[in-house]
């Protein structure tokens, strides 16, 4: 691989340029990480110049992405909407894409295909959106993207990616989107902020240095991909016996199987951290085109013996009940908590687990099933593959729409080495 160019792409300045936007309580709860996404396009793929021109148009209505993280005089982070630009790197690869992309997966690691993520001490002042265009000898293209989570959640980045693809595909006919950008309006506390839930422990840690989970050597964490066909998912939904989403029934299934593979004691408890989009759950609702962070987490929890012996329908009910708990009252309580901590100047530390953490007996799930990453058409068709980076935490899973011809869902999951064989043996069993 050879780097041929590294530039800052600066769009036409947005009216917000110059603003210093405080992080909302939702931004603070998001992990302090750059999130990578890698998309592979076989030849003929769009030209780099077309991608750059489209990027200039698409970033313009999303000015936070061209800004930087900064720190105020009190040590609090904010988003400086300064239009310093998006980092765009171009590389050439002396290989054919077909030789390294096998059945929708890379035969090698993908971390060299997106920009090197800044170290913790380098995040302040780093480009919040960084893109790498990797052009293969055959003309194929791999687009590697990383964006800082304090800037936006997955729903927001899906909106931006969709706009970028449309800008490239439609060229002069591109209609500029008008996202909702007023972060302050999404976090309005009551006149007397009254948090009623223990957000100090649920969404944040007390910062006492006590690790919630054991940290193990990274080589003990194995990343696997499991493909669930549309037919398997239909059978799974039939097992539930009631109307449910693909996400709900698949989470019930994978939770059961990884718990069985771990060989946990029947009396132990296991829970799953489930990301929940709060835009429609807030009261009043936040517009779905809000660009920023608006995610909280539900925590379905069961005793191991109950999880393994319960019907799929019962486990789905447990998941649904936990998610339903994230309602307007809960969201307002969280916003009020943000208001109280802001008044008191309390430092908040998000509960994101460090690399090498072992969630066992617990797990965490993110769903990309509602995002459009797998359909991003820059003018030459949808990507042939969406390639996840290695997940650095045991028990972390990601649901992604499959690129295989008949659809279905791909599960990307980090599993402890000692549980890998057992999980593979039972992951397709509906018993």
Image (cartoon, grey):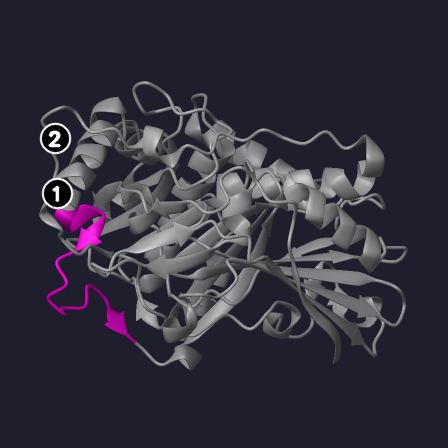
Residue 276 in view here: yes
* Residue at x 77%, y 50% (from the top left corner): 53
Task: Tell me residue 243's x, y (percent).
Answer: 45, 21
In the figure, 371 relative to 91: above or below? Answer: above
Query: Magenta stretch: residue 201 in it?
Result: yes
Task: Tell me residue 46's x, y (percent).
Answer: 84, 53
Circle 1 residues within 10 Å: few <14, some 14–19, many ≥20: few
Q: Which of 206 and 131 is in front in this view?
A: 131
Checking the image for residue 314, the label placed there is: none
* Residue at x 49%, y 49% (from the top left corner): 429
Checking the image for residue 193, the label placed there is: 2
Contact (Cβ within 8 Å) of mark 1 with mark 2: yes
Task: Tell me residue 350's x, y (percent).
Answer: 26, 55
**Quarter holding the C terminus?**
top left
* Residue at x 17%, y 33% (from the top left corner): 336
- In magenta, the rendered stretch is 198-215
Q: Nearer the viewer, residue 16 or 5?
A: 16
């Amino acid at each position: 691989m050879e780097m041929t160019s590294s530039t800052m792409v600066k769009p036409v300045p947005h009216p917000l340029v110059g603003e210093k936007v405080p992080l909302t309580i939702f931004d603070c709860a998001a992990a302090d990480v750059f999130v990578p996404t890698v998309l592979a396009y076989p030849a003929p793929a769009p030209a780099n110049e077309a991608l750059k021109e489209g990027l200039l148009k698409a970033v313009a209505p999303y000015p936070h992405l061209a800004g930087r993280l900064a720190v105020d005089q009190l040590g609090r982070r904010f988003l400086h909407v300064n239009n310093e630009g998006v980092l765009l790197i171009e590389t050439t690869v002396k290989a054919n894409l077909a030789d390294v992309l096998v059945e929708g997966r890379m035969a090698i690691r993908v971390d060299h295909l997106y920009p090197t993520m800044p170290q913790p001490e380098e995040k302040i002042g780093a480009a919040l959106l960084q893109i790498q265009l990797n052009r293969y000898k055959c003309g194929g293209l791999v687009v590697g993207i990383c964006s800082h989570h304090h800037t936006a959640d997955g729903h927001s980045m899906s909106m931006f990616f969709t706009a970028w693809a449309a800008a490239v595909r439609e060229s002069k006919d591109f209609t500029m989107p008008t996202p909702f950008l007023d972060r302050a309006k999404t976090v309005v506390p009551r006149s007397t902020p009254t948090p009623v839930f223990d957000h100090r422990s649920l969404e944040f840690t007390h910062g006492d240095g006590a690790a919630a989970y054991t940290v193990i050597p990274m080589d003990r964490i194995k990343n696997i991909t499991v493909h669930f066909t549309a037919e398997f998912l239909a059978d799974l939904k039939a097992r539930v016996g009631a109307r449910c989403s693909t996400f709900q029934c698949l989470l019930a299934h994978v939770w059961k199987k990884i718990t069985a593979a771990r060989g946990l004691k029947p009396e132990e408890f296991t829970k799953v951290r489930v990301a929940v989009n709060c835009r429609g759950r807030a009261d009043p609702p936040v517009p779905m085109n809000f660009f920023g962070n608006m995610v909280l987490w539900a925590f379905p929890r069961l005793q191991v013996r109950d999880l393994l012996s319960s019907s799929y329908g019962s486990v789905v009910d447990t998941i649904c009940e936990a998610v339903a708990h994230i309602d307007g009252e809960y969201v307002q309580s969280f916003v009020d908590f943000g208001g109280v901590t802001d008044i008191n100047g309390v430092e908040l530390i998000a509960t994101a687990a460090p690399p090498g953490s072992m969630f066992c007996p617990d797990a965490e799930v993110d769903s990309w099933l509602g995002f459009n990453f797998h359909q991003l058409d820059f003018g030459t068709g949808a990507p042939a593959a969406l390639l996840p980076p290695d997940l650095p935490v045991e028990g972390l899973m990601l649901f992604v729409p499959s690129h295989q011809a008949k659809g279905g869902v791909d599960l990307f999951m980090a599993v402890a080495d000692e549980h890998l064989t057992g999980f593979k043996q039972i992951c397709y069993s509906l018993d």
